[in-house]
Image: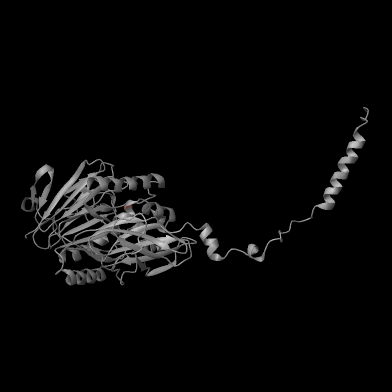
Amino acid sequence: MGRIPQWLPATLIALSLVAIGTLLTAPLYSTPDRSGTTDELRFPTLDEHRNRYATGPTSILLGIGAEPSERRLSWFTDTGVHETVQVAEGSHETMPALAVTVAAEEQAQSARPGHDYVHATLTNLSPGTYSYRVGSERAGWSKIEQFEIYHQNVDHEFTFISDAQIGASGNRADDAAGWQRALQANDELFPDSQFVLSAGDQVEADYTGNIAEYQAYIAPPQMRTQASAQTLGNHDYNLFTPQRLYHQHYNQPNLADYDATRGTYWFVYNDVLHLNISSEYENWDEHREFLESTIAEHSDETQWTILTFHRALHGAANHAVDSSTTDALRDGLGPVIIDLDIDLVLNGHDHSYARSFLIDSDGQQVHPKTSEEQADHGSVSVTPKADETLFITANSSSGSKYYELVDADSYRDGFEPRFRDQQYEPNITGIAVDQCSLTATTVEFDGTAVDTVKLLRDC
Ligand SMILES: [Fe+2]
């Protein structure tokens, strides 16, 4: 054993005395500092807690209105406060004192934990630019955004797209970027487009609703500045029950009561009656009644009738040949469409582009010799007789998923497309409306032409 240094015992004694002193003076548990006033000690109120941690209004979406002078807003919020819209004519960086406050018609707990959904409608808007924000004085406002109300004239353009289907590729961020590129391409290629009409499957959703996919779909800035109208696709529906997030995010005009999927509505936009039905609801008689009565009510004030639904009757890929659902739709809804005076049908679901022959009132294809002419720049003009209908099916608008074209001889008789295209590139379609024609121009994002068809009528 070695020698103990002479200094060690004294050091140990000193350290022990310090430790004992500390133990005697330090409390055994920590108590709050009670030296302040009662006011400083109070717990934050629920409002203060929410304001401190709340994000405020998110997923703000500018929806199409029942008529051109209306816009329908929806958003989610975690403030716990009743929220409203402030709107003012003109373009403003700060909200002017003369801004009008519009109350929400609906605010309730959403399917997103801790968040309400809010719906509000702006009516009687005159042509011009508007600034708006949503929120409250108490819990804060969203950033000010602008939108345009256009002069009501039959001459106008809108954009038709489908199946953004955020999440379908398995990479949500990629799909969201593709969707943002679609809206950017729309701004560049169709700068006069007044609204975007989507034929369904906005999100992948796994049939239950996926909060992050809805957020990604609504995230692009164009969703707050350009009106859009969505359609209920099979992925926007929970197989047997409505998808809560769908109805909470989309504030749709003239929603029909009869449709249990809650995916059928209509709106009028500059001489066009837009009928938008749910192909997930398979009571064709009730759809017939809705279409007949809505067309009868609005035929005097409109010149064109466009019907949009998700599952395509005249698609070009898998679903066109191998789907009992599509066959049921063809047998059930097909006769309804040909019985009614519908000019153009817009579909999605097949993630490939297809344009039909004109379909006559017997459900037969009209021979191109009697109905088609080649027009400028490779476009085709089509002249229907009364009651003949053209069908266009959109490719993917985000690039999240594509389906291969099937063998041309495998289509069910009478349902083969007149023109079809699959380049595995996303598409958007600008539709120009005037008194005597509807011209649908489908392009890839770099402007490469896919198809241009001009649907003429006697006028
Ligand atoms: Fe789809």
| Left or right for 235, reference 326 | right
Q: Residue 368 at x, y = what percent?
A: 9, 51
Quadrant including the N terminus: top right
Q: Along the line of sight, which residue is nearer the eye, 360 or 176?
A: 176
Q: Along the line of sight, which residue is nearer the eye, 439 or 48?
A: 48
| Left or right for 42, reference 227 | right
- Residue at 40% x, 56% y is 59
Q: Along the line of sight, which residue is nearer the eye, 133 or 277?
A: 133
Q: Residue 446 at x, y = what percent?
A: 25, 40
Q: Residue 21 at x, y = what percent?
A: 85, 48
Q: Given the current orientation, which residue lies at the most extreme front position?
A: 97
- Residue 323 appears in which quarter of the rendering? bottom left
Q: Is residue 87 visible?
A: yes
| Left or right for 369, reference 339 | left
| Left or right for 250, reference 447 | right
Q: Residue 19 at x, y = what percent?
A: 84, 45
Q: Given the current orientation, which residue lies at the most extreme top position?
A: 2
Q: Is residue 23 above or below residue 268?
A: above
Q: Is residue 444 above or below residue 287?
A: above
Quadrant including the C terminus: bottom left
Q: Is residue 200 visible?
A: no
- Residue at 38% x, 52% y is 219
Q: Is residue 99 above or below residue 161?
A: below
- Residue 290 appears in which quarter of the rendering? bottom left
